[in-house]
Structure formats: structure tokens, C-alpha cells
Image (cartoon, rainbow, N blue to C red):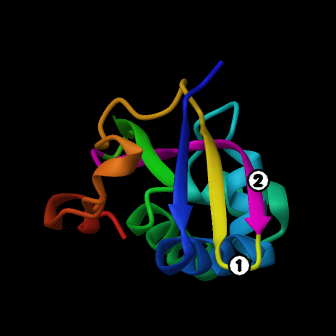
Amino acid sequence: MGGTLSFEYNEAIPRLQLLADIISHKIILSTIDIAKTAQQIALENNLPVSSTYKKIRRLCQMDLLCIDQVNIDESGKKVLLYKSRVKSLEFYLKKDSCILQFERNEHASKFSPRLAEGSSIFTSENLNTF
């Protein structure tokens, strides 16, 4: 079973808001088991490609999605495959606090830092593919 990671209020609320968005939600759910390109995610979920890229960027910045593979297509262009770093989540709301707890997707991330590190997935090298 995967490890867990907990966030308290200041870090939990932005992540929860992002995951409440329908596009982000579909991206996370479609990449839990299999790494996919942004185009695959958009096509399979009937999402606009530009919105999909924007949400992927934000999910990666929040360490909820990662680059799992980098491939080169037949034209020599770099193709990124994304995978959810989250397998499941629980949100606890108490009188004095709230906690967002993630179960890590242990099958994600060959290239990205660990979920708790907080470093950005989007290096200048990777941003050139958008």
C-alpha cells in the first residue's frame, strides 16, 4: 500500500480547490493507472486541449501530477506522459483545523521529485514542449 502525505489548512485548501475543478478531477482520475499524453487525456475526457495543458501545469506545480515518461515522436518532438501522484485522498474538517491527506500513487514518477519536496515539475527544458 502507498504512503500517505498530509497537508494542513494553508496547503490543503489550494490543493482541494484545484481538485474540485472538473478538468483537474478528470486528469487525475484518468492518469492514476496509466501515464498519458495531454492529447490523450483531452481526447478521452472530451476536454479542450488548451485547458488540459493549463490544468496539467497547475497539477504538476502542486505535485499532484508528474512527468512519468519522456518519449521522442517520429518527427523528433519530445512527448511527455503524465501520471497522477495521488491514488486517493481524504479531507478532514475539524473545529480548529482541516487536513487533506493523500495516498501516494507508488507507480508514478520516474523523473519528478517526491511529493513532499515542493519543487516544480516545470523546468525550462520541459516547458519548451507546450
- Image quadrant where residue 87 sits: top right
Q: Which residue is mark 2?
A: 90
Report which residue position mark 1 lands on. 48
Q: Is residue 96 left or right of residue 6?
A: right
Whether tag 2 and tag 1 are in contact, CB under 8 A, the answer is no
Counting from the top left corner in percent of width and height, residue 126 is at: 25, 59
- What kind of residue is marked 1? Pro
Between residue 111 and residue 4, name the one nearer to us.
4
Tell me what residue is drawn at x 28 percent, y 64 percent. 122
What residue is drawn where x is 55% and y is 29%? 3
The main secondary structure of the magenta stretch is strand
Q: In front: mark 2 or mark 1?
A: 2
Please, which residue is most extreme toward the left here? 124
Task: State which region is magenta.
Answer: 76-93
Q: Residue type at mark 2? A: Glu
Q: Is residue 127 above or below residue 50?
A: above
Cα–Cα gap, marks 2 and 1: 28 Å
Is residue 65 shown left or right of residue 67?
right
Callout 2: helix, strand or loop? Answer: strand
Residue 114: assigned label: none
Q: In this view of the protein, which residue sits in the foreground, 95 or 111?
A: 95
Horizontal side of residue 68 vs 29, given as left or right? left
In the picture shown, does residue 5 fall above or below 97? above
